[in-house]
Image (cartoon, rainbow, N blue to C red):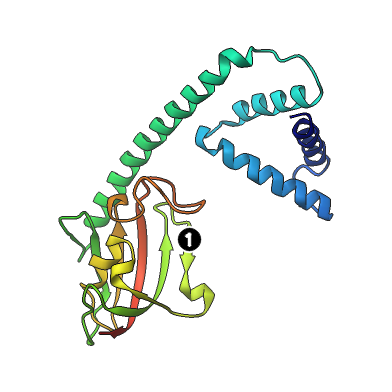
Amino acid sequence: MKKLAVTLITLLIACSAFAGEAPKTEEQKTLYALGLLVSRSLATFNLTPPELEIVKQALTDAASGMSPQVDLGVYSGKVQELARARRKLQGEQLAALNKGFLDEAAREKGAVRSGSGLVYLSLKEGTGTVPGPTDTVKVHYRGTLPDGREFDSSYKRGKPTELRLDGVIRCWTEGLQKMKAGGRAKLVCPSSIAYGDAGAGDLILPGAALVFEVELLEVRK
């Protein structure tokens, strides 16, 4: 615990030394990476800037050997309560955001909403083969969040992706079977047929709706 405290105070001092600047030395970069790891453990709380200052003060006090200003035995349980409350609030806010986003997507000209909640919009009709639920397809795609942030792109990698339709999220399994080779479409996916409450990676939060623009290049039966 003492080693952790020393590491954290070193981190705080180092961060204050180049606040607002990019880390330059290997040690600064390593400490910055440590800060990123610590921030992941705080992500659940969705802290405001003033709240983050309180957390930083606690880190500084503990690392400096000062007596804590609260009884950790009493408040450790309250930390878990706060985490649960913040997760619930985030879920409610995200659900409301997703509903509005999906409803708006469904109103787009030409869009069709299926029983699963998938909103499908053909951007270019293909003339080739329609894939089946176990076929292998070659696609180019771009995935974004409702706020427009991109989380994945085969275009940026410079290479199409090959995959089986029975090995992907349900949104893709359903959506690509509405396409023909040579076509391009937008799939707006509710979380229930995307990554659900598990999320994926750092950007796709639990319960997140997703948008994919998919170009179906080839179908292999």
Residue 21 in sight = no
Residue 136 lies in quadrant? bottom left
The answer to whether residue 6 is left or right of residue 45 is right
Identify the residue at image location x=52%, y=34%: 46
- The front one of 163 and 214 is 163
Residue 42 lies in quadrant? top right
The answer to whether residue 122 is left or right of residue 161 is left
Identify the residue at image location x=28%, y=69%: 166
Query: Quick one: quadrant of the N terminus?
Result: top right
Identify the residue at image location x=70%, y=49%: 33
Residue 139, position in %: x, y? 37, 78
Identify the residue at image location x=23%, y=66%: 174
The answer to whether residue 80 is left or right of residue 3 is left
Residue 38 in sight = yes
Vertical order, 107 against 217 (above or below) = above
Q: Amino acid at mark 1?
A: Glu
Residue 148, position in %: x, y? 44, 56
The residue that label 1 is drawn on is 150
Query: Quick one: quadrant of the C terminus?
Result: bottom left
| Element type at mark 1 | strand
Residue 178, position in %: x, y? 20, 72
Vertical order, 179 against 42 (above or below) = below
- The front one of 100 and 138 is 138
- The front one of 50 and 159 is 159
Vertical order, 115 against 98 (above or below) = below
Exactly how many numbered labels are in the figure? 1
- Residue at the far left in the pictured view: 115
